[in-house]
Structure formats: C-alpha cells, structure tokens
Image (cartoon, coloured by chain):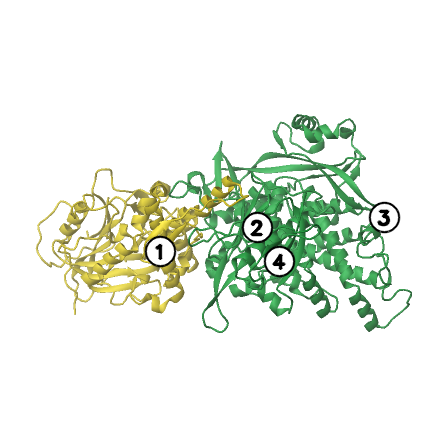
Chain colours: A green, B yellow
Amino acid sequence: MAVDIRIPVLVQDPVAASERSIPLMEWVHLRSEDVVLDGPVSPRVAVLDLDASTGRLRRGARFQSSEQEGTPGTFLLKDPKQLDAADVIQVSVFGAVLRTMEMFEEDDALGRKVCWAFEGSQLLVVPQAGEWANAFYQRESRSLQFFYFRHPLLSGRGEERIYTCHSQDIIAHETAHAVLDGILPDLYHALSPQALALHEAVADLTAALAAFRCRPLVRQVLRTQGGSIASSGAFSAIGEQFGQALGNKSHLRDLLNQKTLKPIDGGKPEDVVTSLEPHALSEVLSGTLYSVLLRLHEALKDEFARKRQARMSLVAPTETARQTPEDAPEPPLAHQGFVAEDAWQEARRRVSGKALAVATSRFKRSLYRGLDYLPPGEVSFADLGRAILAADEAAHPDSGEPRAWLCQEFVRRGIVKHPVELRARTNFAHPSLSRVDLDTLAKSDWAAYDFANRHRGFLRIPRGRSFHIAPRLVVEKLSYAGGEHAKRRVRECIFKVSWKVDEPDEVPSGELPDWRQVTFGTTLVIDCATRRVRVLLTSDRSETRKVERDGMLRKLLDEDLLRVGDEALGPDGKQLCGAIQAEISGGVLRVVGTAHMLHMVEERRYRNGGG
Amino acid sequence: MAALRVRTYSARFGDTLLVSVPDQDADTGLTTVRHVLVDAGNLLPDEDGVDPAFHPVLEDVLAQLGGAPLDLYVLAHEHLGHVKGPPPREPLKLRHAWLTASAAPDYAEQHHESARQLAERRALYDDLREYCRLRPEAARGSVPSLLLGNDYRKAEARAEFLRRSAERAHYLSRDASLMEMHPFKEATLKVWAPEVETREYAGRVFPVALGLERRPGGEVSLHVPGPPAGVDASAFYNLLKWRRQGTGDDLIAIDAAAKNTSIVFSLEWRGWRLLFAGDAGARSWKVMKQRDVLRPVHFLQVGDHGTPDEAILDAILPMEGADGRQRYAVSSEGNGVSRLRSRCTASTPPKGALYVDLMFEDVERQQVPPRLRRAVPARAHGLRGLTRGGGKRRA
C-alpha cells in the first residue's frame, strides 16, 4: 500500500523565485511509494548525500511516519527555510524526483510505473555530488548526480555556492532522462543527432511541465502577465540560476523560441540550427512542441471565456471535467454578445488558469504516450511527431485540431517538408492479428518471436536479419473521446521489435572502418479490446538521417570523444568516463554510450570556463 | 657541403634531440656550428645517482659539444620525461634556455584564470597520487608512470636548475618576440605554440570522489562508507566505484594539458623547415590550425602523443611536397611514425642504437669554411667538413 507523504519541493530556483516574488518552497503530497525511510529512501529512489571531499555519507533526513490515519508522513527538518541545510536538500530533491516520475506515471500518460534501464529497482540520487557546473543521469552508476559550483557574489565580496539540485527544472530534466532511458533504452547508444536531441528536448519539456505544476508560480505568472504564458520565461527558460551564474545568458535554453532546421520566410538567420550538438538541436524540437502548447492555451482561453466546454475539435468535454465541476461559476462572458476589448481580455485572463491546466494535461498526455509509441533504435524528430500524433489520436479521437497545428509547426520549422510525412496509418484491422492470442503474445517470448518471424513484412523487418523483441507492455490508459461519459480506460499492447543494420560509413577520417552498425525498429500498438492496430511505426531510415549520423561521427572524432577499442580505456584499464566507446568487429564499427554527451551543459561550455 | 644534423636519441620514456646547425654570420661570413638541445629527459629512476638509460645520451651530448656551451636548450614542457636534463655535476654550460610560458615565475600574476586552472590540476594530481598511495591496487597499468611523469614538484625543481644554469632563460608563447632569445645569425626560428593562456589546453576533468579525508596535521585517510538502510548494497558500491571512475580521465587530462603547453617551434635553414613539436597533442594542433600557423615542413619531430590527425598532417606534411625536397619525420619512441610513411621518410632510433641521425644538406649554396672556434678531436659522429663550435654569446 502506498505511503502518503507531504514533502517540500523548491518552486523554481532561489534566483528565479526571488525575481518573481514567489515562495521558495511549496509542500506537495505524494503517494507513489510503498515504503519511505530516512534518507529519504524508497524502493524506487534513494537519496545518498555523499560528501564529495571526504567520501562520508551525510546523515539522511529523518522520516516521521503518519501518526494517525489520514494524515501524511513527513520529514523532520531543522529549518525548512535553510536551503543549504543537508536535510532540506535531501528532502526537496527526493520530492522533485518523485513528482517528476508521477507525471509520467499518471493514468492519462504512461499509465504504469516507470521502469529503469538498469538492473535493480532504485534510482540513486546524489544531491551534492561535487564541485562542477553540471548535473547528469548516468545509467552505469544508476544515478542522478547534481553538482555545485562557486560563483562570485554580485557585491564582489566572496563567493556563493550554486547547487544544481536547488533548481526544480534541472532535477526534473535529469529525472526525465532516467525515465526516458527506461522507455527508450536504445537512445542511450543512438548515433543520430536528432535521437540524442530528442532525449534532451523531452527532458526540457518535462522541466517545463513540472513548472506548470507549481501553483504559486502559475498564479503569479498568470496574474502578472494578464493570463498569458506567451511572453514569460517562467516555464520555458531552463536553468535560470545556472545560466546566469555561467555568465552568458539568463538561462541555458529557452523553449519559447523560433528555432528552425531550415531558413524560413521572415525567420532570423541565427534561429537556423545547423549544429549537430544535441543541446542546440533539441531547441528546434522543444520549441516546436512548446509553441503548440501555447497555441492550445490561447485557443482554450477564447473558448472558456464564453463556454463551460471548449469546442470538441479542440478538447473533449471529459478532458475539462476536472477543471469544470458542477458548481463551477458561469464563464465570464456566457450569454453575452460582442464585448469591448478590455472586457474580452479580462475574461480571457480569468479563465487562463483553467485553460492552462487543460492545455498542459493534454500536452503531457500526448507527449509521454508518444514516447511509448516511438520505435526502438535510431529515431528522428519526425518519428516523434508521428508517434505523438498517433498517441493523441488514440487518447482524443474526436479532438484533432491540435494535431493539425502540430503538423503545421513541424513543416514551418523545417523538420518535415510536407504534413504528409507525418501521416501514419492508425486504427486499422490487420490479418496478422486476427488469430493471435494477445495474452500469450504479451507473456511468451517464444510466441512474440514466432509472431515477428511470421510477419516480417508487416513489421518491416529486413529479410534474413535477426531481430530482438523487447518485453511487451500491456497498459491501461485513459481515453477522452467525445460524448458526455466517454472518458474510459483502454488497454493496449505495445510490441517493439528492433534489428541491426550495417550502413556505409562515409566519414573521411581514414581511421574508421567502412561500415557501421545502427539499430532500427518497429513499434506495433494493438488495441486489446478491438484487436485493431492503433499504429505501426518504423524508424526513420532516410538518407538525410544517415548523412547526419556521418556528421555526428565526424564531430565525435573532431572533438576527440570517440575512442575505439582499448583507446576507450584509461591508464588504469578502466573505461574512460569522457569517451564515447566504439568497437570494431568484422570490419563494422559499433558505437555505444553516445548519451554520455547529454549532461546538463554541453561539455564545450564547461571546458570554456563553465566550471 | 654543409649540413644541418638532427640527432634523435633513444632515451626511453622521454625525448632528447640534439640539433647542430652550421650558422653563418652575414656580416663576418663566418660559419659557426650551433647546438640546440630539444628536451633531455626520461622517466626512469636513477640508480645511485646515475640513470643507466639516460647517462650514455648525456655522455654523447657532452661529447658533441666538446666542452663548448650549449647554445640553446628547449624545454618543451615541464614533464619529467623532458626536463630531467643533465645531472647537476655535469659540466654543461648553457647560454639560452627556452621554457614554456606558464613556467615563468610571474605567470600567476599575469594570467589569473589559467593559473587558477593550473593550480586546480595540481591539487587534483596531489589527490590522485595520495589515493594511489593509500590504495595501491588503483595504481595499475600505466598509472604509476603517469603519476611520475606529472610530478610537478620534481619537474619544477629541474626547471629551476635550468633557469639557474642558463645565462638567459626565456618563457615562450606563440606571440613572443624571439629577439635576443637565441644565438642564430642565419637560421630563423619561429614559435608556433603554445598560447600564453594555458586554459586553451585545459581538457575535460571529471569530479572524482576519492574518499580522501584530511585531518589536522596533514594526515590523510581513505573513507569508504557503507550503504544506509533500504539501499541496495550492490548498487551503492557500484555508485562509489563510478564516482571514482574519472581518475583515469583526470590523469590523462592532467598529462595532456601539460603536454599541450609544449613549445612547438620551427627552424628554417637554407631552404629547409624543421618542426619540433614537443608533445603537442590534438588540442594544441587544433589551436595552431585555428591560429593559422601551420605550414608545410621538411622535418617533423613526433612527440609522445603520437602523430597529429590527418587534417593537420595535410597542412604540415602534405602528400606531395612543394619543393621536391625529401621530407622526414622522427620519433624517439616510434609512436605512430608508421602512419607517416606515405608522406615522408619516417624513422626512429633502431633497437639497441643510441641515436639516429638525419642530415639536411645545403643544396643551394657553396660551402663556406666554418669558423674555427676550438680544436676538438675528430669523432665518428662528427659533422662532415665542420668542426664543432658554440662559444659565448657575443656582446
């Protein structure tokens, strides 16, 4: 049985909270862990406050379990306002990690507990990992590590210590990397720049979604910005305290951007991203998706200003049920005709909170479900676009307007040339499923391999190629169809098959073999009730992506990151942390662990004095 | 016919080159053979004050000088493998010594950020050495030799000895003027690297949690905590292991940062351009490329780091030489010289031999009689047609 706990988490970071005049902390209720111990430690997350300089483990915060039924357990903190205190750091990090995990696990998102990409059940969290201007998720050590760094005080007298674990968005970002690694483990070894950038973009978007859940922040921003989030960096700016301390910008990245992959009419040259660096490239994808969220928020404000429910093509009534209880007041402009501009804007402002709650729920749902639908192996932004569209259609079959916006934005930003590239066949019957016992397919590896082998063409597995099938997922998720009582649970089976392909390596280095191995795959999503195919998605295998992989390999070589064979070993014979490992077997290159590039800050910034 | 000679010694785990240049003074018409010693060191420990591998090298160097002063000593960078030099008791007189810019006594005052990073690397080195002392099983593979080679205290002591021995010590970076910094009248020298700000070469350093606990009084102990209640013990110890995993990266980063501050200089003499690259690594070559200093050369000394990458080689040793002259590369250890064979004649001291000589003959001029500085006995390895010279710095 889950333990109910009440726990403080930082709202943003100390600098952002001070600038926006919001409280530093908010207390949240969490109910996802079966056991909670001092530390804090739970079966899935353990905070280990290791002192980097002495190696000692600081005493963990003490957990006070519930004294009477109905009241939550909590942690005994000496002074919750003392942000530098070890117990406050330990507890707030634990809360922020769990809260991020819960966002993924909600019934309308993944609809299941997240599982890690590593052995074991515990994600270890080191909140004060040492002195460095960075934070990262590391699969090998099964951990999130948050560092701190010194920064000169504005007064010029002395230095202050900046803790990356004081930034709610950095914690959410790194937690998202860990969760995403569990969902899409192949991305850890992906060579496609867009696949790595996708990891980064989803982590940044998760940070924004976590910020949308901070009530004091939402209230403050909507009040000061006239009900709009379109001109505030409160949610979209990632790493504000961090970015300011590093000196160049007021943040590390901003989701509120106009970044494109190709020059567009009216666009600025500096907004065209030509770099293959995952952090830079990720801004195109995160900006694309965030702009759809903004558009949905604005459209919902228009609707809710006059009506209790938005039009069906936008969101289903069941999506807004939580924000529209029976006794909710009438919309500000209900039953009114034309009104003056001021009154119109005021009405929109009054409903902006409800619109934001509905928009962010919809956004989170489609994004996280889309991750489940992504094919294994190398993926592209377009792959994610197709997966989100399919997931959104499955969850909101009658509300397709935001899907059309998504397609438009993908085209506008140069991710695809035409909306048709994002089209995937959905909700169709296929003879291969007519006689399959779905329970057996889900539980039996033999049955799964047999099914894939018999339907290679359907699953797009190349002839004669061996393949790997991931454990099948059978999950229940909420669906929000049209109609008054159309919110229901749907059961789906997610079947993922991947295979290795040797592709020519056209990197003019003279040091690498002529071939390299990459992984592609297919995700088949089956509606368990109807036995129809929800969607069948296969990795983007276009020539453009292949050329980008050439570029990534060249970049890794140029930056002296790629190490082949024993070159990846340090002087002590152990694997180097800073190297991307490659192996050559049978004249084919295989690169592993490219996700080591995905630290909070790209390495180059650190090298140039970031740390 | 006059010839410039590059003698590359087989010093084992270190580099030593003696360059002997017939240098003509245009004013007097006299030619003087000037000697440049590029590095002198190895990592092997002395036995009873004598280094069995390095001693014959020094003997030969001194023999080549024949009692005359060494005109120029280039200490490429402060690594023990380069700076060991002659033992204090050897009667080597030294006119000019070139040291890397960051070895200057006032470097920290002029270049705060670079000096801060240097101090951090040294503190990290001290931690790693202490850790290996307390946990000997960590000092495996090539860790001991890296620790030895990067012992900055020993290297500094040797550099200090050089400073005191030389008539003049100079601290060089790319933008330094070489006026009055060398004795050459005819040959021209140019410094290609390093940049004066050594932070250009600071590599990736990973924070490592070694568990060193320093007590008042300087005592250091190693602390390994146990897993708290509820934490998977194997995951816990795996985490501790990974938090130390960066030690290899850090040792390499410390080593590479020092190597990348190598003085890289070219020496041009009668149509030949020779490049002495110290231990310049990838980052140093990259910076040189960015600063547009790379030019085709006829001779390349390859350092510890091995050969530069193909793009750099295309700039300094293109597949086809422009002037038809033979081109050479040499390494004291044979690090990757085979890669150069498609571009030039690559060599390394043969096994068992003390050195390998390369001769660069003056193909354009008529021979000018060398200036006689002092009579020395003829030796098997002497320069053809020339006596040895050097002499004191002119007023």
Q: Chain of mark 3?
A: A
Indicate which disc residue A482 carries: 3
A304 vs A581: above or below: below
Indicate which disc residue A9 carries: 4
For the residues marked 1 and 3, what is the alpha-carbon distance in whole angstroms?
70 Å
Indicate which disc residue A40 carries: 2
What residue lies at 78% left-to-right and 67% top-to-bottom?
A349
For the residues marked 3 and 2, what is the alpha-carbon distance in whole angstroms?
43 Å
A583 vs A354: above or below: above
The earlier-in-sequence mark between 3 and 2 is 2
Indicate which disc residue B215 carries: 1
| Marks 1 and 3 share the same chain | no
The earlier-in-sequence mark between 2 and 4 is 4
B176 vs B209: above or below: below
Mark 2 residue element:
loop
Q: Specify whether residue B253 is in view.
A: no
Indicate which disc residue A469 carries: none
Q: Looking at the picture, how far across and down is residue B173, in whole percent?
A: 33, 62
Q: Is residue A268 left or right of residue A329?
A: left
Q: Is residue A139 left or right of residue B387?
A: right
Residue A371 appears in which quarter of the rendering? Answer: top right
Q: Is residue B219 left or right of residue A230?
A: left
What residue lies at 69% left-to-right and 33% top-to-bottom?
A459
- What amino acid type should be assigned to the residue bearing mark 4? Val
